[in-house]
Amino acid sequence: ISRPTLLKHLDAGELPFHYVGTHRRITLADLMEYKRQRQIKGEAALQRMTELAEEMGLYDAE
């Protein structure tokens, strides 16, 4: 993601960080957990979109 997008996520409290001087620092463990959670949310959204498409007859699972 872009730096401005990352800063928005940090400022929104979605990813913990601490300051070293004027620079934000993120632990690798926190970053990997954030990445894992985004992956889970993305997969759930895709699953829901597929279910809706099937219900509307737009997607044939067979």
Image (tube, helix red, strand yellow):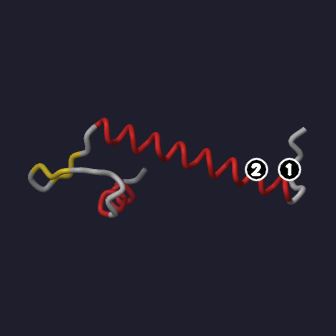
**Residue at image coords 86%, 42%:** 61
Element marked by disc 1: loop
Query: Can you give x and y, in whole percent of width and height, for residue 5 in the image?
Result: 39, 58
**Which residue is identified by label 1?**
59
Measured Cα–Cα span from mark 2 to mark 1: 7 Å
Question: Residue 7, which numbered label?
Answer: none
Residue at the image point whose x is 36% and y is 58% from the top = 9
When the figure is inspected, residue 14 is found, relative to residue 33, above or below; the finding is below
Taking the spot 28% from the left edge, 51% from the top edge, the residue there is 16
- Left or right: 35, with 10 as reference point: right
> Would you say 45 lies left or right of 5 here?
right
Give the SS element for disc 2: helix
Q: Which residue is mark 2?
A: 50
Counting from the top left corner in percent of width and height, residue 54 is at 84, 52
Place of residue 62 in the rendered image (x, y in percent of width and height, measured from the top left): 90, 38
Front-most of 51 and 10?
Answer: 51
Mark 1 neighbour class, 10 Å CA radius: few under 14, some 14 to 19, many 20 or more? few
* Mark 2 or mark 1, earlier in chain: 2
Tell me the amino acid under the disc marked 2: Thr
Is mark 2 in CB contact (under 8 Å) with mark 1? yes
